Structures are given as structure tokens and as C-alpha cells.
Image (cartoon, coloured by chain):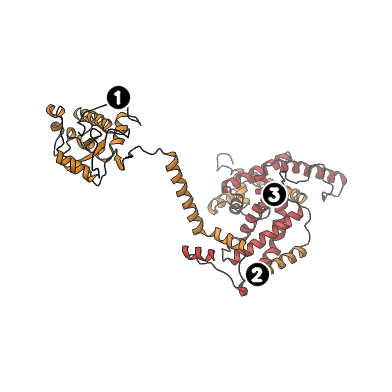
Amino acid sequence: MQGENPHPSDHDLLLVLDGELPIHEAEKVRAHLARCWTCRARITEFDNTIVDFIRVREQLIPPLPAVEGPQALLRLRLAKLATSSKPTLYERVGTFLQLRAVRLAWGAGFALLLSLIVWRFVQPVPDTTSRVAGFEIRSVPDPRLTPGATLPLTRDDVCAAEMVDAARIVPVDVAKKVFAAYGVDTPEPRAYEVDYLITPALGGSDSIRNFWPQPYRNTVWNAHIKDALEDHLRQLVCAGQIDLARAQHEIAIDWISAYKKYFRTQNPLPEHATFLKDRPWE
Amino acid sequence: MLLDDVNSLFGVERKTADRDQTLPLARDVEVLFAEWRAPLLGYVETLGLPIEEGEEVVQEVFLSLFQHLRQGKSRANLRGWIFRVGHNLALKRRYDLGRQVLQQPVPGDIEDVRDMAPNPENAFQIKQRQARLLVVVAALSEQDRCCLHLRAEGLRYREIAEILGISLGGVALSIGRSLERLRNADGR
């Protein structure tokens, strides 16, 4: 047998004995057994061990009582169940719980409830809104009112020196329209910055769709913080580290996330708390 | 009423067999009882339940089988179904009874070992050998013992895997390992 086909493992021999080996593999093993007495002797040992176990098992299981008594008892119980016209409460509850659709619905409902609990009590509620005098102060604009708007400018345009030092003054009529759109009838002086969503320093336009009343107070994500982001993004754009369109997009979509990303912090940096690039509403 | 409302909500039709259908079902269950009561009871006893508790577990299995069939559920592989439910009910009953140790005859307690040997010396050797094998069986893990006993009842590896909640490969490894230990116990 040396140098010819290898002997099957004990595992394969047992599977062949128990009829658990796939047919084509079992045929190979049986073909080998037909010419290998050594492996046939191994099979015989397996058989003998199984015989030993069966005999030991007989010691473990005492002789069973006659079947007639238990069978009569089962017949009585079955007759009682069979003659009941409607299922018992136990059966109905069991059936209810066994309904696959019900199980799926319960599972989905539970998963949803768990998700809501985690979302509400584990995740911090973002400090993006607060209420003062009945007006919901927004750290982020309403995208329906302020989706953002840009001018067709290039990186070279926005990085021109004269734009850096330009102090932007928002026309009064534009500011009033912005306040009116956001439901602010009497805006408190120096409490807001009628802010560009996309700053002109990054190519933002003077369209009313690019303005919103951003507060200086009552939220950590205020105009000072955004000013710091705008300044930083412009530096990155002008240094060629990010392209202009990307900077515009990130500010327009979610400036708070952009701040966290580019300053690598989850909270506003202390030094930005008093950052002032733009003029407050007066 | 609530069940009907829920059923209508989920579009599930609850099948209720009328009287004419439940009686034949009961007869079917009695036939299956006659065939599988002894193997199932024997297996349940290997899990450590005394005979009286085992009989009650078997009764519960076949009453559940009746409900199963009355609800129009699958009749595929009823043998596997019976042993799976019996296994689970037996474990639950054992837990409820607070039995943690498998009830097996210990070596030295074998008084009525049947021996086929014609002379006392052979009878003694057989008794000693059986005692060694019993020690080996008692030392196996419960999963290994269950695999062996279920295989001895004629269940296929796939059925055993479903009953015990293990993989098919796990069943094969378990049985192979157990047989090797039994073989080694005898010095073979």
C-alpha cells in the first residue's frame, strides 16, 4: 500500500459506515477497502466499538413499562383536545406567537424601539437650535430658505488679496427680508449676524438664498465659530489643499460637520469663541 | 377575537381543522406514538430523567405533535421533530426538577449485567470491561453523549445537528471522538 493511494482517515471511515459520506467519495473509500485489509480491520474495530456502546447503552436504559397504559392515557388526552370546538387560550396564544408575520413584526418593532432609545438617550442632541423669545435660533440655516448660492468664480478669483480685507455690509433691505423669511419681527441688535451661508471669501453670492440670521449667543455653534471655519477653509483653498467647489459644498451642506472635520474637534475651540470676521447686525 | 383581528391585519389565514379532521389526526398521532414512544423514552432517560418524568415528557411531545398537525404544519421528518421537541422538553423538565447530574449507573453498581459468556471467568471479564466503558461514557460531555444516543436511535447526522443545535461537522467530530475514547478504554 505504500506509495499508492493514501488510507482514508478514521473520520471518513466512520462517515462511510454511517452512510454520511457523499456518494462519489464513499465509492472511492469502498474501492480502497476492497483492496486494503488494514483499513477493513479498522472498519471492524469501529463496528466492535459500536457494538460495545450498544451493550453499554442497554445498561443505561432500564426496561421500559408496557406501552398500553401510556397509550390509553394519550388517547384520552387526544380525544379531549380533538373534541374541543375552538382552540384553548393556550393554543391561541401559542398560534399567535408562532405566526411568522407576527414574530417578524414584533422583532422589527422591538428593533425600531431600541434604535429610537439609543438615538434619543445615547446620542447627544446636537446643539443646533434653541428658543429665545419664541424664535427658534438656528445654528444651521433652513435649507428650504437658505440652500446657498455662489458666483462663477475660480480659486484664483477668491484668493485675490483685495477680497480678504473686504468688510462685507449686508444691505438693510436684504437683511430685513432675511429676518422676515425666518419669522424674526424685531431682531435684537448685535445678537445676530445676517450671515452668508457660503461666504464671499469662498465665492458665495449676495442672493437672499445665501443668507440667514445666525446668532452670536444661545448656542455654541454661533457666528464666531463659523467665521473661524470660513477663514480656515479659505486658507486651505488658496493653499491648494482643497478645491473651491468642495469647500463651498461642505459649508452649504453642514458647516458644523465641516468645522469638526477641518479642526478635528467635536466641540468649538475656545480661541474661536470670540472670532470676528464679519460685522454683527446693528 | 383578538387573534382573528391580528390575523386579518397580517393577512394570515388561521387554519382550524373541524371535528371531522381532528379525529383522524388523533389516530395518526397514536400510530406514531406506538412507533416512537420507546426510542424517545429511552433517549429522554439518558438525559437523566426518571421513568415517570420521561413518560410525561413523551406524552407532552405527542400532544404537541397533535397541535402541530392540527395547525396544518409540515409533516416532513416527523421523527426529527419528535426527538427535537422531546430533547428540549426533557432538558426543561430536568432543569425544573433541579437535576444537574446525569442519572447513570456508576461503576460497581452493575448487578445485572447480562453476559453471554458460558463460564464465570469470561463473565467477570465482560463485567469489568462494561464497567470501564461506562466510566468512559459517563466522562463524555453531554453533547457527545447525546450525539451517540441519538445516533444509536437511528437518527441521521443532519437530524442530530438540528436537534442539538450544532453543525453537521460537529456531529461527525463528536461521534468520532466518542468512539475513539470507547475504543481506547479497552486498550484497543
For the N terminus of chain A, the quadrant is: top right
Residue A78 placement (x, y as % from top left): 68, 67
Query: On the picture, is A151 further left or further right than B4?
Result: left
Determine which of the numbered discs, if any, sits on residue A82 in the image. 2
Query: On the picture, is B77 further left or further right than A218?
Result: right
Q: Nearer the viewer, residue A224 or B20?
A: A224
The hue in which chain A appears in the rendered picture of the protein = orange
- Look at label 2 and name its amino acid: Ala
Foreground label between 1 and 2: 1
Report the Cα–Cα distance between label 2 and label 3. Answer: 29 Å
Report which residue position mark 1 lands on. A271
Residue B136 placement (x, y as % from top left): 72, 41
Q: Residues within 10 Å of mark 2 (few under 14, many from 20)?
A: many
Determine the chain carrying the residue at label 3.
Answer: B
Determine which of the numbered discs, if any, sits on residue B96 in the image. 3
Q: Which chain is red?
A: B
Asked whether the viewer can see residue A35, the reply is no
- Look at label 3 and name its amino acid: Asp
Foreground label between 3 and 1: 1
Same chain for mark 2 and mark 3? The answer is no
State the residue at coordinates (49%, 52%): A107
Q: Is residue A96 above or below residue B170?
A: below
Q: Nearer the viewer, residue A282 or A231?
A: A282
Same chain for mark 1 and mark 2? The answer is yes
